[in-house]
Amino acid sequence: MKTKMIFYALLFTCALQAQTKVWFDTDLMIGMPDKTAREVDDGITLIMALKQPQIDIVGISSITYVDYSYDIIQKLLKWHHKGESIPVYKGSPKADDLGVENDATRALYQALKKEKLTILALGPMTNIATLIQNHPDIIPQIEKISICAARTPGLVFNPGNGKLNVFDYNYELDNASMNVLLESSIPLVFAGYEPSSYTHIGNIDLASLDQNEEADKWLFDIVQPWMENNEKYFGVRGFIPFDCSTLGVITHPDYFTYYKDIPIKVNYKKNDALEIQPTTPYKNFLEVSYQFKSKKKVDYAIRALQGFEEKILETLSVKK
């Protein structure tokens, strides 16, 4: 019996040692009061990340709407994280001040000085690019950055019934900061619209949430306006959980197919989302292709495989 206990203790110790140390940078907007409902995928991804034994989140930073997101992140931590407290920092408030230090960039720099980290980048790249631009000495401490952005040439972002095209928000809101990352030596993996489009969450999928639990009921209720918004614009009551793929390539890499070491390039082309960007006839596209001659090569997730959507839903139902 004693030998078996030692064996399990060793297994537990090995599991802890195998955890990926992660910094979570997010433009979380779930439940934000506005004229129309805001995206919920950052919030769902944070809940999912807090329940993953494969990763150890050492810090969380926000970008855009930093005052609102700070309070929501604290709420989610109270509900879903029972271990050692995770510090939360406010970053760039508008994603338009590349190079300007903030609480998030300073904290991330100090965290990286202590240990190597993987960065999950779920919003614009302003916080991370500011760190890299101002402190290039810290680059070797970044294991990789997982980013929700980019596309293959000709791919149109048209969720649901395909009648309305959307744009590559995280890239287009601050493409100067993305350029800083592309010019660095840091390994990058992109998992955005393309792999995420193979997953879809609707009301039936969320039926496993416990309506008697405060956290589950809050999530179910706060997701409804976003579902209604998607039904109005895309003809489908439900949504694509974009950022879950950005996390998934770190926690569940075998549930995705990839283009490995594929060149990435910025191309200036005719806008394919004119209905929501009517004053921008042409714009920059962040694209990957083996036909490009770009020096920078990245890993690019093409598709979320069958079973990943179930992993998202299973994780949301886990009680910690």
Image: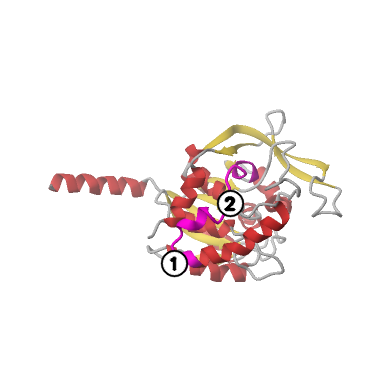
Percent x, y of residue 23? 51, 55
Query: In which quadrant is the C terminus drawn?
Result: bottom left
Indicate the amino acid at tag 1: Trp
For label 2, the SS is: loop
Q: Nearer the viewer, residue 151 or 223?
A: 223
Percent x, y of residue 292? 72, 31
Indicate the amino acid at tag 2: Pro
Q: Nearer the viewer, residue 32 or 55?
A: 32
Q: Nearer the viewer, residue 95 or 221?
A: 221
Work out whether mark 1 precedes mark 2 in sequence or the reverse, and give the earlier one.
1
Can you identify the residue that label 1 sits on?
79
Percent x, y of residue 231? 68, 56
Q: Is residue 215 magenta?
A: yes
Can you identify the residue that label 2 sits on?
241
Q: Is residue 292 left or right of residue 108?
A: right
For label 1, the SS is: helix
Percent x, y of residue 184? 63, 44
Q: Which residues are magenta?
A: 193-217
The answer to whether residue 294 of the structure is visible from this angle is yes
Mark 2 surroundings within 10 Å by alpha-carbon count, few (fewer than 14), some (14 through 19), many (20 or more): many
The answer to whether residue 29 of the structure is visible from this angle is no
